[in-house]
Amino acid sequence: MPEIHGNKGRYAKLATMLKQQRRANQKTFFFFGGGSLGPSILSSFDKGSHIIDLLNSLEPDAMGVSRREFSFYAKNLSLRSYDATFPIVATNVIDAKTNQGLDGIVNSTITEQHGVTIGFMSIIDNVDLEDYTFSQVSLTDPQRAIKKAAAELREAGAELLVLQYTGYYPVINQLLDDNVIDVSLHKDESYEDIDYSSRKYHERDVFIKSPDGIAVLSLTIDNKSPSHLKDFSYVIKDIDKYEQDKAVAKQVAGHVDRLKLILAVEIGKFTVPITTKRTIVRSSENAFGNYIADSVREFADAQISIINSGSIRGDLNYAAGSPITRETIANELPYRGMIALIEISGATLFEAMENAVSAIDVYKGRFAQISGMTITFDSREPVGQRVKSIKINGQDIQLTQMYRLATTDYLVSGGDGYTMFKDLKKLDAKHLAIRLVSDIVTDNITRDKMLSPQIDGRLVDIKAKINER
């Protein structure tokens, strides 16, 4: 739940739910699944410190680390951990330089409520290495990390072991069957976009499929049982069914009020309908994406530019005539990304574009919005064989020729699978290091006032063309 701004009031509603659960049973444990420090409007300013402030009021027993905790890199996560009054857990994450756990982050934890002890672990999927920038950290083998931490927790006296995880691990079922762990928890807000029919989940693997879902587990511990459980059941509750807790709602309002004066400033207008809906912007050319990519290319004085669609986060539709405020930009571009200028060969550009269209069917953020070139691809083809042509100024690119490419520091560090960028020559452009991508887009909108970006055929999917006939 990274976003506190708006009318959902999830943190205040979660506070009400927790109060009810704690009143009904003193032996209530609250494990927060993370995925919240970013990206969001407010976190683009304070890097998630307001989320820790709210969580301190909700008093979780522990928080698991998810990929979004790395929205502002590992160093910031460590800083936030020192603000937290609860342990933040990452079982298979280590510092790439020291090969030790991240500063301030624990490998696992034991928490106790009225004589009951639960051990908690949290692992991150290796696929997240591609989606977020993990240059400062390494991920250890998850199965080995779980078994090691579980043995240590049992030895320390934990009666029950709970694992939070991201991604999909068939091995989780075996770990549950073997009683290495007792309960596993995971959540996927993109459930409706992905086919899960072939995946098998254990009866003690709790899967939350809704953005507003909260899992409430009822457990009876039996230390004589191999599974350590006598009874196990759970329900998924809708957080929106609860009233807002007044104290936490006031706390949220205090954070939001800090932004209102800044965010309310109107800087332009959309003169045509615009969409930034997630499934659209991550699978096809997008008019607003074109405007951003054009702004990046222009500012860097590059031949071409690439931005990842995952950096566009609004997931909204705008009618013609809609005002563009600073809040609009903070909502659409919440990451504090900088522009990087690199030299790239035509062959490597082909490789990058293959990565861009490699996960179009599951709407990954690596899908590119581009400027200065046109790409023709066929999403029906096998991954790695989809890009059919790349043209610059109407001419096919030359595999050995070098081009000036403007992109983001996130992609240059290998984020979203763009590992081919990591070792490319960085061109000297010191002026790029003083402005965020969101600042440059804001400046251009302030200059242009009336925006009518168009889809002009930069990204052409042959499959889509055939389907239109």
Image (cartoon, helix red, strand yellow):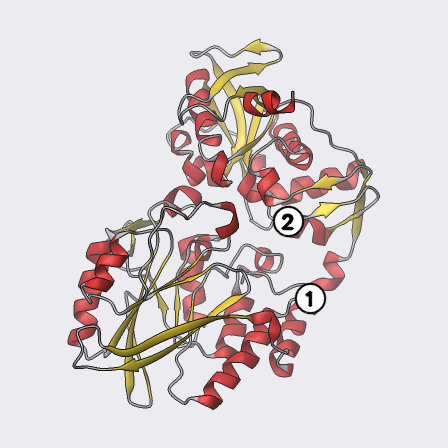
Number of numbered discs present?
2
Give residue 374's position: percent from left, percent from top. Answer: 59, 19
The residue at 65%/44% (across/down) is 439
The residue at 67%/67% (across/down) is 256
Q: Quadrant of residue 436?
A: top right
Give residue 55's position: percent from left, percent from top. Answer: 50, 73
On residue 7, the disc is: 1
Give residue 462's position: percent from left, percent from top. Answer: 56, 20
Residue corresponding to mark 2: 314
Mark 1: amino acid: Asn
Q: Mark 1 falls on what kind of element?
A: loop
The residue at 46%/86% (across/down) is 22
Q: Please say whether residue 280 is visible from this viewpoint.
A: yes
CB atoms of marks 1 and 2 within 8 Å: no
> Which of 70 and 34 lies nearest the eye of the viewer?
34
Q: Mark 2 falls on what kind of element?
A: loop
* Residue 188 appears left or right of 369: left
Badge 1 or badge 2: first in the primary sequence: 1
> Which of 294 and 457 lies nearest the eye of the viewer?
457
Mark 2: amino acid: Gly
In space, the residues marked 1 and 2 are separated at their CA atoms by 15 Å
Q: Is residue 165 above or below residue 24?
A: above
Please state, as top left, top right, bottom left or bottom right, where the C terminus lies in the image: top right
Q: Please say whether residue 98 is visible from this viewpoint.
A: no
Q: Residues within 10 Å of mark 1 (few under 14, many from 20)?
A: few
On residue 39, the disc is: none
The residue at 60%/24% (across/down) is 467
Q: Is residue 392 above or below residue 273?
A: above
Q: Residues within 10 Å of mark 2 (few under 14, many from 20)?
A: some
